[in-house]
Amino acid sequence: MSLRPLPFEARPVRRLHRPDAREFWAKHSTEPVVLTGCMEDWKLLKELRARATSEQKLALLSSLAGSEQVRYSTLPQRTGGHYHFQDNDPQRTTYGPPEPKGPFDVFASRLLESLNGVSDTYVYLQAMFLDPGTPLYESLGPGVLPLLTPEQERPMMWAGSDGQVVNLHYDDFLNFICMVEGTKRVTLFAPELMPSMYHAPFDRMLNYAQASQVRLLEPDLERFPLFQHALKEAQVAVIEPGEVLFLPPMWWHHVESYGFNVMINNWVFPAPLEELIALQEDVTKAIRLFQNATAEQRARARMLYHQSVFAPGDEATGPENDPQRAETRRLVTRLPDSLRRQLARYYDHFVFQMSGDPFPGQPGALAAMMERNAHATNYFARD
């Protein structure tokens, strides 16, 4: 399938064939990688390949879904399939409210109409959880992926009618993106590039994901000049049926879907959910604590935090005379390295403001976010 050219250069994500689980987690789980040979046992992949038309493939999915009720989104043609913030209203996204929950075969019928040109809307099913014991779940096995333990298996299905584009965002967890039909192109940026990514306010998210204000395929470099630095570090992965893209936590990704597309993804939480919430609440407290600090005070505090809180292992000591630092240090000792590093990045960017205004593309956005959430314990929480 011919993919539209990217308006910038990006280096390809490395590829790895069917790694041993122990080797993968020890050596290959800190950066994105395309995995091949990990879906060879999937009955769903084999049966979709055996069907020639989209109608036949959707009939198979409908038979496996049975009476499952699903919620999906539609976008008018004028959006170009882009899921992003509206140009004239950054508080809203281009996606409207999802369709009311209904039978899977109704969704399949609307998707087929879009594929055949009968309707002029994009149709997209997102994050349909597959419950163990159901025909869809069992069609992935045995065992979803050989790299996962049974406790890590949380598969979800995503299906679209061609052309969907989900703009730059990141997740708190590890993500295995498994293609079973169609093609996805995923453009990636490392977590370290946050100062150049024009982070949207925490409470303005794309379907529960933290997001960028920049439209990757049409970047406004006059409004977002720092993004030029990120573009020099762009990586890209094109994934076809039978291939898996692994994403570590906090990697920015932009996803384009081509053709009738079906993807199963599996999130793996790097820490218990309560620890992720504790991280968000800690950042919220720190932003409030330093909201009126001077640049000099922020710089001194940053030095103390990096010496006594964020330093790994025994190099740091618990600053018991400072309640906020002591609380953050206790949290850090419970977090895996990826989240410890991300918490330090959050502090540098949003608390200590090492790059200036944390939301440079939206002057006043930090104060507005704080005002909107004056009584909330968590700026990250969605309304």
Image: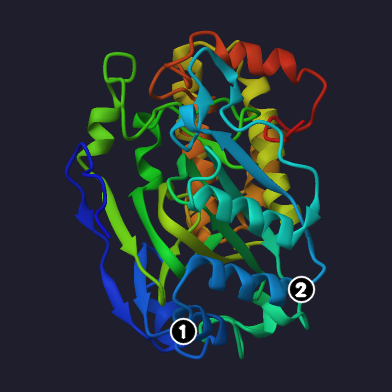
Q: Quadrant of the C terminus?
A: top right
Q: Where residue 197 sits: x, y (%)? A: 38, 32
Q: Earlier in the sequence, mark 2 or mark 1?
A: 1
Residue 74 found in image quarter: top right
Q: Quadrant of the N terminus?
A: bottom left
Are the residues flagged by discs 2 and 1 in contact, CB closer than 8 Å?
Answer: no
* Front position in the image: 289 or 57: 57
Q: Where residue 133 sits: x, y (%)? A: 78, 83
Q: Residue at the spot x=36%, y=62% of the render?
A: 31
Q: What kind of residue is marked 1?
A: Ala
Farthest left residue in view: 9
What residue sits right under mark 2 in the picture?
131
Residue 115 to residue 14: above or below = above
Q: Residue at the spot x=37%, y=43% of the render?
A: 192
Q: Where residue 119 sits: x, y (%)? A: 56, 41
Q: Residue 50 — which label?
A: 1
Residue 335 found in image quarter: bottom right
Judge the density around disc 1: few (<14), some (14-19), many (≥20) Cα neighbours within 10 Å.
few
Label 2 SS: loop
